[in-house]
Structure formats: C-alpha cells, structure tokens
Image (cartoon, coloured by chain):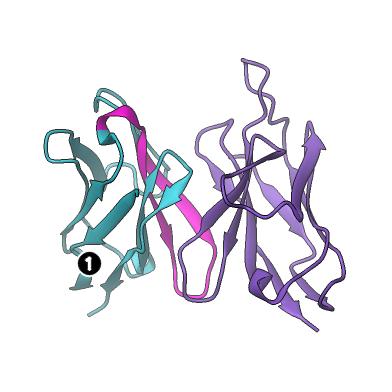
Chain colours: A cyan, B purple
Amino acid sequence: EAQLVEFGGGLVQPGGSLRLSCEASGFMFSGYWMAWVRQAPGKGLEWLANIKEDGSETYYVDSVKGRFTISRDNVGNSLYLQLSSLRVEDTALYYCVRDNDFWGQGTLVTVSS
Amino acid sequence: DVVMTQSPLSLSVTLGQPASISCRSSQSLVYSDGIIYLNWFQQRPGQSPRRLIYKVSNRDSGVPDRFSGSGSGTDFTLKISRVEAEDVGVYYCMQGTHWPKTFGQGTKVEIK
C-alpha cells in the first residue's frame, strides 16, 4: 500500500528557513513525478513545485520561485522541499503528492515572529 | 495562470438526492496530446485530498460509481447521483494541462 509521510514542519520566524521531507513507501518512487502542494489554514490548495522522476526537471509556481527548492533521493525514496526567506503568508499545511493521484497527510509550517 | 472557477461554492443536499458542481477554466484544457488533464478531488473534514476523477471522466480505483465527471474544452462537471453522509467535504477541480497546475476555490458539500 502506498504511503507518503511528511515531516520537518514547525514554527519559524519570518526570513527563516526550513527543510521538509517526505518518505515514500509501497510503490516505485523512482517511477513517478512528485510534487509539493500547500493549503493555508481554512483556505484552498496551491500547487507549489514538481520534480521529474529522475530529478532532471523541476518547476515552481511564481510565488515560491527563488525561495523554495524541490529535490529527491531515489535511493532513499525521499522527497524534499527546502524553504527559505519564509514569509508569514507561507504558513500552511504542506502536502507531498505523488504525481497528482496520492497525497500524504501533510506537515504544518507556521511562519510567525 | 489558468483560473479555475467553481460553482456553487457551497451546496446543501438531502441524503439520497443528486448534487452537481461546475468548474470552468479561463482557457482550453486540451493539451498538445489531445488529452484534457482535469481532475476532481474530495477533501473530507480533517483529511488530505483524495483524487476521485482524472482526465475529466475516469474514476479512480475505489471511488463509488455514484461519482461521475464530464465536460470538454473549458466547462466541466462533477456529479454525485445520490449523496451519502460520507460525501460531506470540500470538492476541488484541478487542471494539470498548463503550468502551474491550478485548483478551483472548492465547493463545500453538506447534508441538509
């Protein structure tokens, strides 16, 4: 059974950094595009970044381009999102998503002074 | 960016009655391969989103057949033939044809 478990969220000050991780199991991780999607408290969904199966291509939404970096480790079956220059408006539940068909439970990032 | 507009934003339905959610895109969702990458997701209270429908009308494994998707070009619809209590939640359409992928605002479905 496919599983995605995110961790690494927490409270960080504006301007700070954080690294989110997502551990995948139950499917061939290296055979899928992976993504990060976020949901601000009580709000809708925002697709943030995609990474190709082999990590050779990445795409970002404009709101995070230059501040967030998506990466992956196909040996360790893990997906990462490096968050930097964080803003209050980055506060959200961050989901790890397989292609677009399977989602983890999310990890909460709170940006506040 | 492609804007996805859902209507209504909330829906109160009697158990056993049908429900319909509309989703319109600001531009055509037909990709260069001829496929329309339009998905529907369900987010139950306190849960992560679950994909119900992909490529307009294909139900995901385990999704009850009371859920159906239809549409073409820029207009799409999710229908629930007979609403059950477990269908309560927020439903999102999402386009995967153009980057960045974008979602509708969500439609909250509750039981009357």
Residue span colored magenta? A30-50
Q: Residue at x 47, y 69 (%)?
A: B47
* Vertical placement of residue B22 versus B70, above or below: below
Horizontal and vertical percent for residue A100?
A: 47, 42
Q: Residue at x 76, y 80 (%)?
A: B111
**A44 drawn magenta:** yes
B20 to the left or right of A45: right
Q: Which residue matches tag 1? A: A9
| Observer able to see residue A12 | no
Horizontal and vertical percent for residue B97?
A: 59, 31
B79 to the left or right of B106: right
Specify few, some or many for label 1: CA neighbours under 10 Å numbering under 14, 14-19, or 20 or more. some
Amino acid type, residue under disc 1 in the picture: Gly
Residue ranking furthest to the right: B17
Horizontal and vertical percent for residue B52?
A: 61, 50
* Vertical placement of residue B2 versus A8, above or below: above
- A8, A113: nearer the viewer: A8
Q: Residue at x 31, y 53 (%)?
A: A3
Horizontal and vertical percent for residue B1?
A: 58, 40
